[in-house]
Image (cartoon, rainbow, N blue to C red):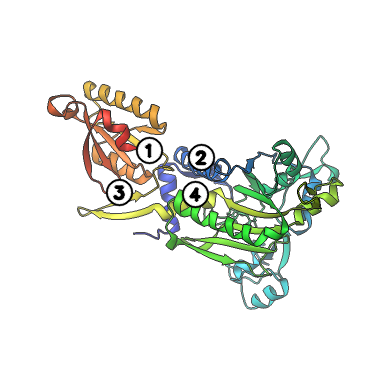
Amino acid sequence: MNDPALETIVSLCKRRGFVFQASEIYGGFAGFYDYGPLGVELVNNIKQEWWKAMVREHDNVFGVDGAIIQHPKLWEASGHVAGFTDPMVEDVVTHKRYRADHLANTDSTDLAELKELLKDVTSPDGNALSEPRFFNMMMQTWVGAVQDSSAVSYLRPETAGSIFTNYENVRETMRAKLPFGVAQIGKAFRNEISPRDFIFRVRELEQMEMQYFIRPETQAEVYEDWRTFAWNFLIERLGISKDNLQWHEHDEKERAHYAAAAHDIYFKYPQGFKELWGTHNRTDYDLGAHQKASGKDLQYFDDQTRERFTPYVIESSVGVGRMLMAVLVDAYNEEEINGETRVVLKLKPSIAPYRVAVSPLLKNKPELVAKAREVYSTLKKEFGNVMWDDNGNIGKRYRRQDEIGTPYCVVIDFDSLEGDTKDTVTVRNRDTTEQARVTIDELISHLS
Ligand code: ATP
C-alpha cells in the first residue's frame, strides 16, 4: 500500500521514535513537536544532503547561521510586523479560531471574497462564524529587564531576515561577485491560527532557505534554474517519486507581500497535494527596504560595467518538517510477503537513519556475539550510522529494521565461524528481502 493515511504515519513516527508530541506528558502543546532518536538522524541526513547540494556544490553559495532574535526594526522594514498575517474567523460560541481561507477552501486571502464564500459556512462545531479579519503570526517576546512596549522583540518568522542584513558582510568577506547566494538552515516561529496535519503546519518550524543575489535582467532565467534545482533535489537526492510532486503557481491574491512571482512544489501528503517548497522572486524589495530603514548603502557596484544598483533576489525556501513528512509518506509501503504484511520504509540509503544493522543470530552465544561485535565496529568506522540489534528473533529484527528503513541487515551465524563459510556473513536487502552470503573482507564494498 502506498498513500498511507495520516494516522498511519503519526503512529509509525511515535512507535519507532521518529517524532513525539512536545510536552506529551502534559497533554502535548498544539503546534510543537520533538524529534526522537530516529527522527533526529533522518532529519540531520536530510539537512546535510541539502547543505551539500546547496552550499558545498556551488562555489558561489555561502552559509550563515543567524540569531533567532534580531533587531525589531528588521521585521518592521521587511513588512512582517504590519503584513505577516493570515485571514482568521472565530467561532462565536467556542471562540476557537480558524484560518478563513482553509474553511472556505480557497487560496485567496481577500477579505471581501472570503466573507462572501463563508456566508453560509459554520464552524467545525456547527456554530456561526465571525467576519474574517487579519491576524498577525509573529511571535513576540521581550528582551531585557523591562517588559514594556519598547522591549518587544520577535522570534524570526523566516530565516531570510538575517541573510538580507548580512548581505554586505558576506559579499565583502567572501569577495563575492553577482550572482551569489547565501544559505541558512534554522528555526523560525509562526503563531499559526490552526496548527494541524501533524508536522505539516506547526508553530515552531525549521527552514532551509537560500537567497540568490542577481542582476535584475537575469531574474527569469535564474528563477527557472532554482525551480529546477528544487524539483531535482527532491527526486534525485531524496528519492521522492515524481508522481507525488506537482507545480503550483501563485496568482496575485496568493503571493506574499514581497513576491513578483512564486512557484511552489506541492507534495501529495495524506491530506492532499500541499505546499512543500517555494521558489520566489523577491525582486529588490528586501535589500531596498533594509537600505531605506537602516540608512546603510546596500547597493552593488559592478566594477566591469561601472553600474551601481540594488540586486534582485531569487529565494528558495523549504520547511525541514514538511520535507521529513514527505520523505516518510513517499517511502512508506505495506507489502504482502508469504501471506504476511510487512511495513517497509524504502528510504534512499544515503538518508536512512541507519545504513546497516548488525546482529548475532543468537544473543546468548558468546562466539557469535564476539564475531558480530568485530563486524559492527568495522562497519561503524566506515559508515558511522550502524545499529547493533540483538533483540527478539531474527524475523522480528528484520521487521523492525524494515519499518525504520535500514537498507541492509548483516547477520553473523554459525556458518560465519567455521568451515568453508568461515568469515562470511549474510546480508539481507530491505527492498528485495533477498539474502546474500558475503565475506567479511568484501562487506564494506558490497554495502557501499
Ligand atoms: P503556507 O501557505 O503553507 O502557510 P507559506 O507560503 O506561508 O506556507 P513560506 O512563507 O513560503 O510558506 O515558507 C517557506 C516554507 O516553510 C514553506 O514552503 C514550508 O515548507 C515551510 N513552512 C511555512 N510555514 C510552515 C508551518 N507553519 N509549519 C511547517 N512548515 C512551514
The residue singled out by tag 2 in the image is 44
Q: Is mark 2 within 8 Å of ligand 1?
A: no
What type is the residue that disc 2 sits on? Asn
User: Residue drawn 58% across and 42% down?
Assistant: 55
Depth check, front residue: 102 or 303: 303
Q: Which mark is residue 431?
A: 3
Residue name at image x 20 percent, y 52 percent: 338
Q: Nearer the N terminus, badge 3 or badge 4?
A: 4
Q: Nearer the viewer, mark 1 or mark 4?
A: 1
Residue count near mark 3 (Cα–Cα under 10 Å), binned few <14, some 14–19, many ≥20: some
**Amino acid type of the residue that numbered disc 3 sits on in the rendered structure:** Asp
Q: Is residue 293 above or below residue 411?
A: below
- Decide if residue 377 is on the left or right side of residue 51: left
Under circle 3, the secondary element is loop
* Residue at mark 1: 355
The residue identified by callout 4 is: 324
Q: Which quarter of the frame holds ligand 1?
A: bottom right
* Residue labelled 4 has its Cβ within 8 Å of some atom of ligand 1: no
Considering only order in the chain, which callout, 1 or 2, is on the residue closer to the N terminus? 2
Q: Quadrant of the N terminus?
A: bottom left
